[in-house]
């Protein structure tokens, strides 16, 4: 194994001790429902503070929660996609703690009977080199311990407030917004595995259309649990929980930092303290959260205002039918069906839109390799230049496929194809319309070319004689003349062969 999976450390007396990292992730994903989990308030992001609230989500006395069916459907679809066992009966529980952004004094969550359990996510995970390149991707399955539904808390706002007004502000718009929490098994041994899992989990949520996956805005949040243990040991080490990881890069850096820190503590004869630490991007390190901010005993108990959630079998069966082809299956199919490498397939399946675009183009072109090249070079460049995403692409995938067919049929040279591509992207016309409008016909037709060649040879008897006498490089002269006559439209391959034949006649 290579660092940082196992980091070799020289102990004082010269013994070598190898440590292995163990990581588990807890991911919160905000569900894309229009209304909150237990009331009809809007979930819209960016509304004026406290405008999306009502007696239920404000926790006013006597207000009763009513479960949002759409949130259950999204959570169940997620559980199914993660190969979980969906419990026919699950139970809502109160998780009690005090915090200013939690007006009820408890969060409605699920505890000993969650919606789903014992799932897994399969990922093509590799190893990261010093330069950041990922190589040696292999299929790995990581266990999912549980997935449950819960409501979000509100937000305390400190930023952007004047220094002189040392106050906290509370925005309760987010209070009661539906979340799914997805808890992994402690199955990752490197930061790269955790990174690959989170990437794939995010992709899966996007394919399902249940979460927008935006980590910066907090619709996808990840806490990481890390411990280290002597390599080969069966027993898990003491874990530290890291919070404040609002990007993929932070996750990876925080894990690497924390793994080294714990190994250093252990190799110096110390003990890892079980605590919650925060990632500090400015200092590139983790530091302990003030311990009073940690509430260990939530005194969970069944939520008295909500009955157990019963899922009907027929409803579950209908939900199974709504599942799309999931990212892992699609990636593997792209590799086998279109001959793509793992990195190429992962790139194209990043979103359903780009995967759909590629498939339509690959099929229309009958040339999956060329479709990949056009999409990732010319099209990617054009989209970037016009500041567009693939879903706003003005060029339909079957049109691009048509263009590729024309190149393969010898109707267009590479250079002409680029011109046609640019015009297609700009005007949305079909390749034929553009070819006609710009007069970009490549002459591949032997009889049409033969006529021009005959004329050029007849007009240059001296050069023709030189060629026949063995001066082969005169051929270039003739190629140039024919190209000039045809305004560069002669198919070079056809022209070359035909010229040689005619000159030798
Ligand atoms: P807690 O009760 O503190 O929340 P859990 O047992 O519920 O702990 O686990 C929370 C997360 O921590 C899970 O993702 C799990 O895989 C991970 N985890 C548990 N034990 C360890 C450990 N020793 N090292 C790393 N991760 C761990
Ligand atoms: Mg936990
Ligand atoms: Zn409300």
Image (spheres, rainbow, N blue to C red):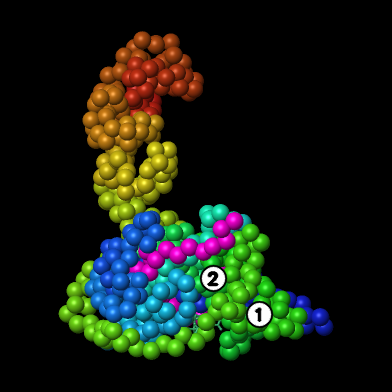
Q: Quadrant of residue 395?
A: top left
Q: Earlier in the sequence, mark 1 or mark 2?
A: 1
Residue 172 is one of the magenta-drawn residues:
yes
Q: Which mark is residue 169?
A: none
Within 10 Å of disc 1 (Cα), the crowding (few <14, some 14-19, many 20+) is many
Q: Quadrant of residue 255?
A: bottom right
Q: Residue furthest left?
A: 314
Is 142 left or right of 63, judged from the image as shown?
right
One can see residue 362 in this view:
no
Within 10 Å of disc 2 (Cα), the crowding (few <14, some 14-19, many 20+) is many
Image: magenta residue range: 164-193
Q: Quadrant of residue 190?
A: bottom right
Looking at the image, residue 97 lies above or below residue 358 = below
Tell me which residue sits at (33%, 85%) in the image: 303
Look at the image and tell me in which quarter the N terminus lies: bottom right
Is 468 left or right of 262, judged from the image as shown?
left
As helix, strand or loop, the secondary structure at mark 1 comes to strand
Q: Position of residue 26 (x, y in %)?
A: 47, 75
Q: Which residue is mark 2?
A: 243
Q: Which residue is mark 1?
A: 19
Q: Position of residue 107 (x, y in %)?
A: 39, 78
Tell me which residue sits at (61%, 83%) in the image: 274
Residue 207 is one of the magenta-drawn residues:
no
Looking at the image, residue 252 lies above or below residue 161 = below
Look at the image and tell me in which quarter the C terminus lies: top left
Report the number of discs.
Answer: 2
Q: Nearer the viewer, residue 185 or 362?
A: 185
Q: Nearer the viewer, mark 1 or mark 2?
A: 2
As helix, strand or loop, the secondary structure at mark 2 comes to strand
Tell me which residue sits at (32%, 33%) in the image: 426
Tell me which residue sits at (35%, 68%) in the image: 177
Report how far apart the C-alphas of labels 1 and 2 lie in the structure.
Answer: 23 Å
């Amino acid at each position: 194994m290579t660092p940082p999976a196992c980091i070799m450390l020289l102990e004082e007396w010269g013994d070598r001790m190898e440590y292995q990292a163990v990581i588990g992730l807890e991911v919160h994903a905000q569900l894309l429902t229009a209304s909150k989990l237990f009331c009809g308030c809007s979930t819209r992001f960016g509304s004026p503070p406290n405008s999306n609230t009502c007696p239920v989500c404000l926790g006013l006395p006597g207000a009763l929660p009513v479960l949002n069916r759409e949130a259950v459907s999204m959570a169940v679809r997620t559980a199914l996609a993660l190969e979980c066992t969906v419990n026919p009966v699950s139970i809502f529980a109160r998780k009690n703690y005090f915090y200013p952004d939690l007006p009820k004094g408890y969060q409605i969550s699920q505890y000993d009977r969650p919606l789903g359990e014992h799932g897994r996510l399969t990922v093509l995970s590799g190893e990261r080199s010093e330069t950041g390149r990922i190589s040696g991707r292999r299929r790995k399955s990581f266990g999912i311990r549980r997935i449950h539904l819960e409501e979000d808390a509100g937000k305390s706002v400190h930023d952007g407030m004047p220094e002189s007004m040392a106050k906290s502000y509370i925005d309760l718009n987010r209070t009661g917004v539906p979340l799914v929490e997805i808890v992994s098994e402690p199955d990752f041994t490197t930061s790269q595995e955790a990174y690959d899992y989170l990437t794939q989990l995010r992709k899966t949520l996007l394919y399902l259309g249940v979460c927008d996956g935006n980590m910066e805005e907090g619709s996808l949040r990840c806490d990481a649990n890390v411990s280290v243990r002597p390599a080969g040991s069966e027993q898990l080490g003491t874990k530290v929980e890291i919070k404040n990881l609002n990007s993929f890069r932070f996750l990876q850096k925080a894990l690497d930092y924390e793994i080294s820190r714990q190994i250093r503590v252990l190799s110096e004869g110390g003990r890892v303290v079980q605590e919650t630490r925060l990632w500090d991007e400015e200092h590139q390190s983790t530091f302990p959260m003030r311990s009073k901010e940690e509430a260990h005993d939530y005194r969970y108990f069944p939520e008295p205002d909500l009955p157990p959630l019963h899922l009907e079998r027929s409803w579950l069966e209908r939900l199974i039918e709504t599942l799309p082809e999931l990212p892992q299956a699609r990636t593997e199919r792209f590799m086998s069906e279109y001959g793509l490498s793992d990195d190429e397939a992962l790139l194209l399946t990043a979103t359903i839109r780009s995967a759909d675009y590629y498939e339509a183009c690959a099929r229309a072109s009958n040339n999956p390799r060329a479709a990949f090249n056009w999409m990732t070079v010319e099209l990617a460049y054009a989209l970037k230049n016009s500041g567009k995403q693939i879903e706003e692409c003005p060029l339909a995938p079957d049109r691009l496929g048509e263009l590729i067919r024309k190149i393969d049929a010898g109707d267009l040279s590479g250079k002409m194809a680029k011109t046609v591509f640019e015009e297609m992207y700009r005007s949305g016309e079909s390749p034929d319309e553009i070819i006609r409008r710009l007069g970009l016909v490549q002459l591949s037709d032997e009889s049409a070319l033969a006529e021009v060649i005959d004329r050029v040879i007849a007009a240059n008897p001296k050069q023709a004689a030189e060629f026949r006498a063995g001066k082969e490089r005169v051929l270039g002269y003739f190629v140039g003349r024919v190209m000039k006559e045809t305004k560069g439209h002669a198919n070079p391959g056809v022209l070359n062969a035909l010229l040689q034949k005619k000159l030798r006649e």
